[in-house]
Image (tube, rainbow, N blue to C red):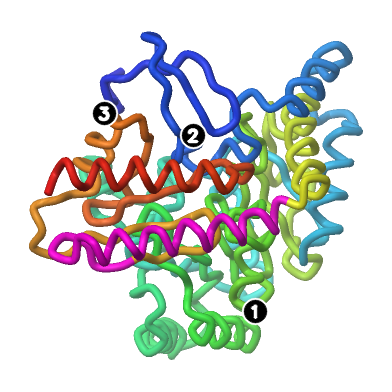
Amino acid sequence: MNTYGRFPLALAQGNGCWVKDTQGRRYLDAVAGIATCTLGHSDRAMQRALRKQLGRLQHVSNLYRIPEQEELASWLVNNSCADSVFFCNSGAEANEAAIKLARKHGHQRRGIEQPVILTAAASFHGRTLAAVTATGQPKYHKGFEPMVTGFDYFPYNDLKALEALINRYEQAGPSIAAVLVEPLQGEGGVNPGDRVFFSRLREICTERNILLILDEVQVGMGRSGRLWGYEQLGITPDAFTLAKGLGGGHAIGALLVNASADVFEPGDHASTFGGNPFACRAGLTVATEIERRDLLTNVTARGEQLRNGLQELVNCFPEHLQGVRGWGLLQGIVIREGSSWTAPALAKAAIDHGLLLVAAGPSVLRMVPPLTINKREVRELLRRLATTLSSLS
């Protein structure tokens, strides 16, 4: 079906941070499946682990215990604020699970008949119907009305607006089940969360027994330089969602909750493929390699190198570029209002210079390379981007 506006490029092979197309041309990949290929392409550790897993067991039903699932859940719990995990297959599915959790919390814990979930403007939470309703971008709603009821939106990082919205809903009694928000908005323009905003948000949610659920689908599993985005903000959520980088290029999603937020019982939610042995082996391999290779240190160092290099490019093209924002290896270069450049056009132009980039809206060009990228490759990324920009100026 015609659901993608694709670039005229067919990728056939990859290794590390590099991919080749069907014509044999080589590209430095700063998209990584959109922040998904944590260890890069065709990683040897991943190959070994998955080959071995396929020789044992690839899928069984959640009617039975799955050792690989339990092992991955233990790693996630031991390395986060969560106490339990539900596995699924994508970020949208993880957020759908979170929405159901929030609604049951609203009914059961707050006595709300019609619970409301608050999300941020310019957010992105997935394409399934409830998740796209939670997404605070009207362009994604157009043509799919009526949207799911029970959602409202506040400007990201705007504490005054958030407090006013909460007070309006709660003036006659409990109405809000949860606040679902990204620690850093990825698709919405690489907007990092504000620590003061999130600190107060955590206080409000605690005071009112409203669940604070963080969507860490894009920033989780080390991309920010910390394992979890909430660590960048100095808070702990009641629940958070994962996907993308968790599987290192394989389909897996997860909802992680602390004990006080876990209102699910057997039969409340399920997934045929969620937490299957093959997907969980991929997740375990990513987790193990993040630790073994000390990738968080690499993300911090290479992220700083990338950010500094991007700032130099902003200084070189001040009539078109405004600034740089992001965390770790999730960086965005902001196009100045009034410039003839757009992020999609820059991403397309970069292909001709052997560089793969991805837009985050019309005015932010995003870089999300594998967490294994090295110093030389970051220099090459910046060189190819500079060449691209020069060709357009």
Residue 179: which disc? none
Q: In the rendered picture of this protein, how many numbered marks are placed on residues?
A: 3
Q: Observer-nearest residue: 294 or 145?
A: 294
Depth check, mark 1 against mark 3: the one in front is 3
Q: Residue at point 84% right, 29% down? A: 63
| Residue marked by disc 3 | 352
Identify the residue at image location x=62%, y=76%.
110
Q: Residue at 68% across / 69% down in the picture? A: 238
Give residue 27's quadrant in the image: top left
Residue 348 in picture, x, y percent from top left: 24, 34
Q: Name the amino acid, label 3.
A: Asp
- Quarter of the view holding residue 311: bottom left
Q: Which residues are magenta?
A: 295-323
Q: Which residue is mark 1?
A: 234
Q: Earlier in the sequence, mark 2 or mark 1?
A: 2
Q: Tell me, yes or no, whether the highlighted magenta stretch contains residue 314.
A: yes
Label whose residue precedes the other's in the sequence (2 or 3): 2
Does 91 appear above or below 272? below
Q: Which mark is residue 33?
A: 2
Gap in angstroms between the C-alphas marked 2 and 1: 29 Å
Q: Determine contact: label 2, label 1, CB under 8 Å.
A: no
Going by the image, does 98 lie left or right of 59?
Answer: left
Q: Is residue 149 visible?
A: no
Pointer 1 local density, CA inside 10 Å: few below 14, some 14–19, many at least 20: few
* Residue 23: quadrant of the picture: top left
Q: Secondary structure at mark 1?
A: loop
